[in-house]
Amino acid sequence: MKLNPIDRLTRGLPHSTRVVIDWVVTIAGAVLIVLALKAFIVNPYRIPSSSMEPSLHCARPGADCQAHYSDRVLADRISFRFRKPTRGETIVFKAPLLARERCSGGGGTFVKRLIGLPGERWEERDGIVYINGKVLKEPYVKPDRRDNRTLPERVIPKGQYFFMGDNRAASCDSREWGTVPRKDLVGEVFAVYWPPNRISFR
C-alpha cells in the first residue's frame, strides 16, 4: 500500500501525534483553497445601501431599505477575463476616488447595474434613460424608484463603463462621479446566498 506524503513524513510518530498533524494539514489545506477561490474565482459582498432596492436588499433601519438583513451576494471574478461586460448585469467594481468622496458611506467597492458601454451616448430625461437617443427598457427599475432628473447627453469614453443603481432616487452612481475603467470591474453578481429566504441565482 502506498502511503500519502503526510503518512510517510509522520511514520514512526505516536498515533495521537499523527492524528493531530493530519487535522492541522487538512484544515490548512481547506483554508488555502477558500482563500484561493476568494482571490481568483468567487468573492462575497454585502449590500450596504438602498441603491439597488428592490433587486438587492439592504437592512432596516437604513433609509429606503426593505429587509431585516442585508443581502449577501457572490461575484464571479473570472468571467470578465474571457468576455466583455454586458448591459444590464449587476457588477461589483472598485469605487473611483470621487465616488468614495461623494457617496455617503461609500467603501472600496460598489455594486451597481451596468447601463452604458464604451462609445455610447447616455442621457436621462425626466428619469428615463436614453442610450444613443433611444429609450432604454429597464424592467429592473420599479416606477416608484425612479427620479425625475434630466441630465445632458454624455459620451462614454473608450474602455469605460457607466453604472446606475436600480433605486434611482437614492443612488449615488455614475451620474455623480463618472465612469469606471474596465480594469476596475471585479465581476458579475451571480447569486444571493444570504439570508436563506433570498437565496437565488441571477
Image: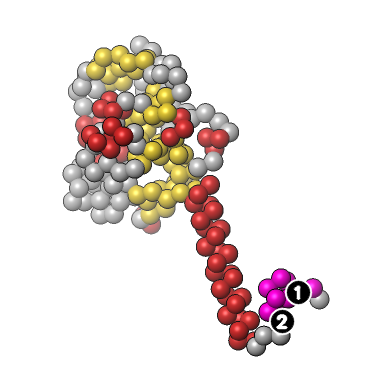
Under tag 2, what secondary structure? Answer: loop
Q: Which mark is residue 11?
A: 2
- Separation of disc 2 and disc 1 at Cα? 9 Å
Q: Is residue 11 magenta?
A: no
Q: Nearer the viewer, residue 179 or 200?
A: 179
The span shown in magenta is 2-10
Number of residues whose C-alpha sits closer than 10 Å to that of mark 2, classed few (under 14), some (14–19) or many (20 or more): few
Name the residue located 76 percent from the left edge and 74 percent from the top edge: 3
Q: Is residue 5 left or right of residue 82?
A: right
Q: Disc count in the image?
A: 2
Horizontal and vertical percent for residue 46?
35, 49
Q: Is residue 33 above or below residue 191?
A: below
Question: Looking at the image, which residue is at 40% across and 37% down?
Answer: 93
Three-letter code for the amino acid on which mark 1 is drawn: Leu
**Mark number, residue 144:** none
**Toward which corner of the image does residue 146 lie, by quadrant?**
top left
Residue 137 appears anywhere in the view: yes
In x, y percent, where is residue 113? Answer: 37, 33
Q: Are marks 2 and 1 in contact (CB under 8 Å)?
A: yes
Q: Position of residue 57 (x, y in %)?
A: 30, 46
Q: Is residue 112 above or below residue 118?
A: below
Q: In the rendered image of this protein, does residue 125 appear above or below residue 28?
A: above
Q: Which color mode does the image show?
A: secondary structure
Residue 111 seen in this snapshot: no
Question: At 24% from the left edge and 43% from the top edge, which residue is drawn?
Answer: 105
Q: Which residue is mark 1?
A: 3
User: What amino acid type is highlighted by mark number 2?
Assistant: Arg
Quadrant including the N terminus? bottom right
Residue sitting at x 38%, y 19%: 156
In percent of width and height, residue 132 lies at 38, 13
